[in-house]
Image: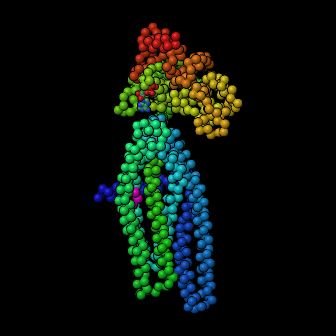
Amino acid sequence: MAESRRASLGQVREFFSDIAFILTLAWEQHKPLVIGLGLVRALGAVVPSIQVYIGKLIVDQLVSLIQDRSQQALYDVLFFVGIEIGLLLLAQVLTSLTVVLDDVLGEGFPFAILGRILKHTSTLDLSYFENPLFRDKIEAVDQEMTWRGKGMLSIILNLGSEVISLIALAVVLFKLDWIFVAILVGTMIPVILIEFRQSIITYQWQKSWSRWWRHAWYYRWVLAAYDYIQEFRIFRLSPLFISRYLDIGKRYIIAFQSHSLRMQNLHFVKNILSHIVGYYGGLVILLFRALSKPITIGDITMYMSAYRAALGSLSALVKNIADIYGNHLFIQDLRGILLYTPRIAIAPHAQTLDKETPLAIEVDHVWFRYHQDGPWVLSDISFRIEAGVRMALIGDNGSGKTTLVKLLLRFYDPTEGRILINGVDLREIDLDSYYARIGVIFQQFAQYDGRIREQIGYGAIESMDDLEQIRNAARISGAEPFIEELPQQYDTPLGKWELEEGTVKLSGGQWQRLALARACMNQHAALLLLDEPSAALDPEAEERFFEQLLREIQGKSIIFISHRFSTVRRADKILSLRHGHIDEQGTHEELMQRNGRYAELFRMQARWYE
Ligand code: ADP
């Protein structure tokens, strides 16, 4: 019991911190709009209580008009009616303003928040993006933002409006007698607590069912998916999957009945409390008061309309509480993402690399594993590449080549050992200045949506408009001939999303050449990292590509991964990895003389081509 109360208290605390979080985000993004909307809403929230009070004055003046039939009384009534009309107009204006400001803020909110999230995630290191849970969270936030984001702020601001409105109505009731405020508060508190209880129950209910919903969704999806239909026909799986789906449905209905009953019970208590105990209880007290104290008809109508308005605000308030709770998981995800911090720490006095000095790289007894308890992916790797040296990295799949490239790019830090750039630990180097000296093509290179000149220009954004430099990079990578055959040449739109009309489709090899051109774009690059840069090229194209690359690129270090020995043999140095260890290293000739695994594999491949 105590435990469940503690849990509920915890959830109430989370509720308020969710509100604070969203308000802080909104405040950071749109200060003037939030202030404007806050003022308009606050004013709008007190108008009903003033209307109620003026209503009482009208009724009282009407009574004296009926009794006295004096002109003064008529003028008084007309005066108050005039005020009431003015208030009505003011309320209309404020409502319209609230809607407009709410909409403007609501439409901009998802952009602002996603912008903030993207800014944050762009500072996080690669390891986060390799974690499926992290990616799921970002995807969920991204998807839900479009439909939750717009209304989220206005739900919270509504809650504030209703609270102000209730306080203002309580002030009006206080003018009658404090007892009515006590009754209002006395019924409101349990009603709000019950609403919290209901929201928590709904939240837990949704949580407990979300796993089953995923199952049901899977069965529904699989039964209609084209990829499965053939096996479903042959193995006659449809009845089994349909019965599994219906079974979940049956269990759901049974569970839902008791959930719904529980919710309705609480709903019933809530209504009894607020309507019967609160409203009619207060009315009876007021009528008894009439026996001992002078009470006007205006007082009675004021009580009735104030209490009814308070009931309206109360039900809006509890609905807002439920809505905010409904967004809890989403807000948790949002907050969770912003709480992630970069793991790759940049040293406070990191050394900035200039744009000219050649780079010598030393990998010094590096050990690496992805997870604390995981297997070693790299074990005691040591080698050195002087500036301008071309090194080939070879090894079976899974031997650690790409991981080594990732360490050289400081996507991860070595678990043990260090990587030195011109004698300085990579952890002590300003990464922006290091990346400004690197050209890279990854195994899974990007295929951007954009013009060809952009696809290449992204490799050196400061030179994106330099068509000469772009052409030069395309020439080195061998992309130039096919680009020049396209009607729009460097202005040809490309991309999977086909954002532009007339988007052209390229072959895998052509895309790869563009990615290579991007890698060659940076004229300040002192190190080129090429992870299987020719995987999509045929052997002849690869041969020509490397020949050209090595001819064109002088004085830069190159580390390339390749499985084709005709290319590998051109390297000044070959490093062969096996199960994360250095198996062999040396020049082609040295390794052939050694007559080890390299020589064996080389001869094997040479025989295939004979
Ligand atoms: P290669 O490039 O030589 O094919 P990789 O460097 O990609 O090899 O992978 C080396 C080993 O590290 C493999 O066993 C692979 O499963 C593992 N590995 C690669 N990336 C990750 C990762 N993000 N998390 C955990 N293990 C990984």
Residue 513 seen in the current view: yes
Image coordinates for residue 492, horizontal then vertical, percent: 67, 33
* Residue 566 shown in magenta: no
Residue 432: % across, % down: 54, 33
**How was this image coloured?**
rainbow
Relative image position of residue 469 (x, y in whole percent)? 66, 27
Tell me where residue 309 appears, x and y as whole percent. 49, 72
Residue at the farthest left position: 1
Q: Residue at x 59, y 73 (%)?
A: 87
Q: Is residue 438 above or below residue 264?
A: above
Considering the whole magenta stretch, tell me its main secondary structure.
helix
Is 88 on the left-hand or right-hand side of 188?
right
The furthest residue to the right = 487
Residue farthest to the top, as pictured:
593
Instruction: Work out whether 371 lies above or below 17.
Output: above
Give the number of marks.
Answer: 0
Q: In the displayed structure, would residue 224 be above or below residue 477?
A: below
Quarter holding residue 105: bottom right
Question: Which residue is found at the position 40% from the left and 44% from the top?
Answer: 239
Depicted 300 relative to depicted 523: above or below: below
Quadrant in which the N terminus appears: bottom left
Q: Is residue 178 visible from the viewing direction of this image?
A: no
Q: Which residues are magenta?
A: 198-202
| Residue found at x 67% / y 36% | 502
Question: Which of the two residues, 176 or 188, is positioned nearer the viewer here?
Answer: 188
Q: Nearer the viewer, residue 573 or 533?
A: 533
- Ligand 1, by image quadrant, is top left
Which residue is depicted at the point 37% across and 59% down?
257
| Between 352 and 281, the one nearer to me in the picture | 281
